[in-house]
Image (tube, coloured by chain):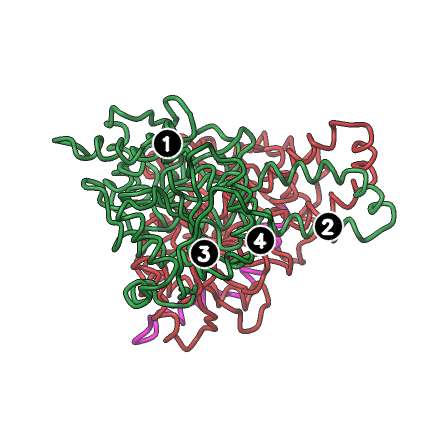
Chain colours: A red, B green
Amino acid sequence: MKIAVDAMGGDNAPKEIIKGGIDAARLLRKGVEIVFIGPKERIQREIEENNGYNLPISTVNAEEVIDNNESPVKAIKNKKNSSMVIGLNLLKNKEVDAFISAGSTGAFMAGALLITGRIKGIDRPALASVIPTIKGGILLLDMGANTDVKPKNLLQFAVMGSIYSNKVLGIKNPKIALLNVGKEQEKGNLVTKEAYKLLCNEPSIHFIGNMEAREILQGNADILVCDGFSGNILLKAIEGVATTFFSVLKEEIKTSYISQLGGLLIKSHLKKFKKKFDYSEHGGAPFLGIKGVCIKCHGSSDASAIKNAILKGETYVEKNIIESFIKEFSDEGAI
Amino acid sequence: MKIAVDAMGGDNAPKEIIKGGIDAARLLRKGVEIVFIGPKERIQREIEENNGYNLPISTVNAEEVIDNNESPVKAIKNKKNSSMVIGLNLLKNKEVDAFISAGSTGAFMAGALLITGRIKGIDRPALASVIPTIKGGILLLDMGANTDVKPKNLLQFAVMGSIYSNKVLGIKNPKIALLNVGKEQEKGNLVTKEAYKLLCNEPSIHFIGNMEAREILQGNADILVCDGFSGNILLKAIEGVATTFFSVLKEEIKTSYISQLGGLLIKSHLKKFKKKFDYSEHGGAPFLGIKGVCIKCHGSSDASAIKNAILKGETYVEKNIIESFIKEFSDEGAI
């Protein structure tokens, strides 16, 4: 198995990306190899600095980089020598089994669709991400690939999420909820009201009804289905509140000697608490519905986040869920 | 000026509602009167218990109550003697100047539309709520009245929010942002992309562009415009994360003697921190676009939240912004 990593994608590229890849290479099963894509010499230097010799690592040269400010479709079409385009082409040609990038989300999605392509029967691939909850995590999809959806898309997200959750995350009969403004069936916008009915009538999934945003961190569902606009708002709201709370709490504790002492005494507990809600522990966001394992990491990913995404990617490939998707969605009379 | 209060609406009715009303009555300007709507005897008993004699308080009898599980429109049509319907009728007939309720949000909105009515030229009234930020607060609208909107509705929300923010909250030339999945103009769903253009071209407001959910608590805008579906998700996500964080932090601190001591030392700071992000400090949610001052309080409102909503209502009436809305929206060639 070969897992390709875009060495040039993300705010901390290439240093943290390569470090993460090397850390992962030490933990991967025998026969699994990391393929870094980027400027060969630069990558070699980082591998040397991190004592990454003798690990199952290879390099594919790529001289161009797509940055966040470029128009995604144009960048994919024009920058044939970028790490992103080369990586997705390797995936398409089955020269690698997975592609991981912390680069531009727009270019990643456009490239995955244009180069690697959709699985037949899946109208709209979805980005899925685990939100940490007090009971572990909930798989949110779509988190931003589709800002406008039809009810049928939400049903397909639910089916893909269910297969992924079962096979990759190891959850039997995962509980699926629909993100909504109220618990009752009749609540919501035109799309969710219609999607509710479709979800109720789909026998292959375990739909438990609507879920309001305030309940999510309680962890009473395994999968949360929504359009990419709301999903993105939700994810970033949780991220923003968490970040702001920690920084305001820190400032507040600094205001007196007594509270500084108090802060010291709870420091290790605060760290544990912070770790509980740390996204990067849960690996990257798989782009489900693409004909290949594509994982998008947060732009601010550090080595640890990249390492976790690679390890998740290994399971993703191993469980062969692309085949499961093809089987589920290509059936006669499928969704 | 008369401010009517639905004594029977909300999880803590009537006790906390009446206590909040009495607390407000002690602070209101001369000539402002509280009108409690609900079962007269019960209200009288609460007034006595809270030593509320000799305050500017009167009572209007209402024997029925609309609860959260009823169909909003049916309840409004059938329960003519409910505190909600009687209150909205008093408002419509100008026997009171404002109506405040912590009862069913659905019934409140349906009743305000059906009984009190829309201001001409405003297609969709919007519920507005202040989200506490590190710099004070941001006015979010719509927070749930309109789950499906057109770009034009978002423009009208922006204009209403701007007038309200200026006149009631005292913010000169308030900065308006559009809730979106990215900062760039071309980001978003079909509605926000179109709304962006309308907002750019409206001379009466100060539009500063798109805002992502993770930036909201930084407080760099005064008003955040969105559809009611996303607004509701956003608001409840913030609420849910805040609640979960405090309870998990509390549990975490309890796990050792040392951290318990640490917790004690930072207790007063935690309280200050919690107060900073406390919704109830900011009063209720005005339903903007209705021909009368309607304020919806959170179902779990305590006396302090009700008191704050009443005090906000007093300013709302005094500044006569209903007249400003009528003027702005009824002009020839208005929005």
User: Marks 1/2: CA distance?
Assistant: 43 Å
User: Marks 2/4: CA distance?
Assistant: 38 Å
Do the residues marked 1 and 2 share a common chain?
yes
Q: Residue furthest bottom?
A: A203
User: Label 4: chain?
Assistant: B
Element under disc 4: helix
> Which residue position is annotated with label 1?
B318
> Which residue position is annotated with label 3?
A141
Q: Residue furthest right?
A: B257
Q: Is residue B6 left or right of residue B86?
A: right
> Which residue position is annotated with label 2?
B250
Residue type, numbered disc 3: Leu
In front: B207, or A155? B207
Q: Is residue A310 visible?
A: no
User: Marks 4/1: CA distance?
Assistant: 29 Å
Q: Nearer the viewer, mark 3 or mark 1?
A: 1
Residue type, numbered disc 4: Glu
Q: Nearer the viewer, mark 4 or mark 1?
A: 4
Q: Which residues are magenta?
A: A307-335
Do the residues marked 2 and 4 share a common chain?
yes
User: Label 2: chain?
Assistant: B
Residue B61 x, y percent position in the rendering: 40, 59
> Which residue position is annotated with label 4?
B48
> Sequence order check: which comes first, mark 2 or mark 4?
4
